Amino acid sequence: MTAASPAPLPTDWRRWVLGARPRTLPAAVAPVLVGTAAAATTGLTAWVFLCALGTALFVQVATNYANDYSDGRRGTDDPGARVGPPRLVGNGLATPGEVKRAMLLAFGLTALCGLPLVIWVDPWLALVGVAAIAAGWFYTGGPNPYGYAGLGEVFVFVFFGLVATVGSFYVQALTITWLPVVAGVAMGCLATALLVVNNLRDIPGDTQAGKRTLAVRLGDRRTRILYVVLLVVPFVLLPVVAGAGGRPLAALAFVALVLARAPVVRVLSGARGRGLIVVLAETGRVQLVYGVLMAAGLLVTL
C-alpha cells in the first residue's frame, strides 16, 4: 500500500488564511478578553472592546505576513529546509509583492481599529500603536531583524502579554492596577510559549539559515525546559489573580491545566519536527481556554 500523497496547497483565497497562521491568533484574542474582563468593575464599553480586539488581531496577522514576506525574501523559508506549515513566499503560493500588500493592508486595519481609541480614549495610545506596528515589522524585517538575534520572545511577551492585557484594561478603566499586570504576565508566558515551541521545531532549519533565534542560542534541551516553565507560570499566578484580586472564580482557568498536560509530555518526551506542529496547536488551545475561563471568572465579583 502506497502512502497517501499530501493534500495540494491552496491557490485561492484560502492561501491568505493559511498565511495569517490561525493557530497563532489565540495569542491576540485571549489577552484582550482577560484585560477587558479585569476592568468589569469599572463598567465596560462594547465598541472599546471591539476596537481593542480588532487592533490585536490585525497586528498579529500583519506580523505573520511581515514574517512570511521578510523570510521569503531572504530565502530562510526554503520548504526543503523546514518542517513547519507552508509559507506563502517560501512555497510559491504568492509573490513577495502580494504578501507585502497583504501585510500593509493588515497593518492599515490595525491602525483603523486603533484610531477610535486614540481619538476618544487617550491620544497617547497612538505611541503604543506605532510601537506595536514597528515591532511587528522589525521582528524579521529591516537590515537587522531582532527576531534573528534571539529577541522575538521579548516582543511577544511584551506586546501579546503585557501591552494587550494592560492596554485592554486601560482603555476601559482609564487607569492601571496590579491585577491586569499580573494577568498580563500570565498571558505573556502563554503567548511566548507558542513562539518557543515554533522555534524549537525550526532549530535545524534556522541554524542552517543563520537565524540565531533564542531556541538556537539555548539549544534543544534548554528550550524544552523554557517551554515547560512558560506553561507552568500562568497556573502559579492564578491564585494571586483569583485570591488577592477578589475574583475567586478566575481560578476556573485551572481547567486548562488538563489540556496543558499533553503538550508538556510531548515536549519533555523529545517530540520533533511534525510532532511539534501538534504541540503548537495544543498550546494555542491551552492559551485560549485559560484566557476565556480566566476572563469569565474575572467578570464575576463575589
Image (cartoon, helix red, strand yellow):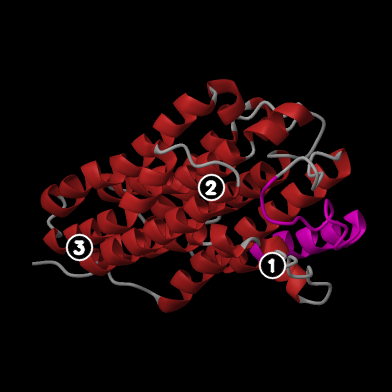
Q: Position of residue 149 (x, y in %)?
A: 66, 26
- In this view, the mark in front (2 or 1): 1
Question: 300 or 128: nearer the eye?
Answer: 300
Q: How far apart are the two marked residues, 3 and 1, measured between alpha carbons?
A: 48 Å
The residue that disc 2 covers is 276
State the residue at coordinates (53%, 22%).
Answer: 218
Q: Residues within 10 Å of mark 2 (few under 14, many from 20)?
A: many
- Give the mark nearer the N terminus: 3 vs 1: 1
Give the CA distance from mark 2 to mark 1: 27 Å
Q: Label 3 amino acid?
A: Leu
Q: Secondary structure at mark 2?
A: helix
Q: Label 1: state its secondary structure.
A: loop
Kindly identify which residue carries mark 3: 252
Q: Kindly tell me whether residue 207 is visible in this rendering.
A: yes
Whether residues under marks 2 and 1 lie with C-beta atoms below 8 angstroms apart, the answer is no
Residue picked out by circle 1 = 1
Q: Is residue 96 magenta?
A: yes
Measure the alpha-carbon separation of dots 3 and 2.
27 Å
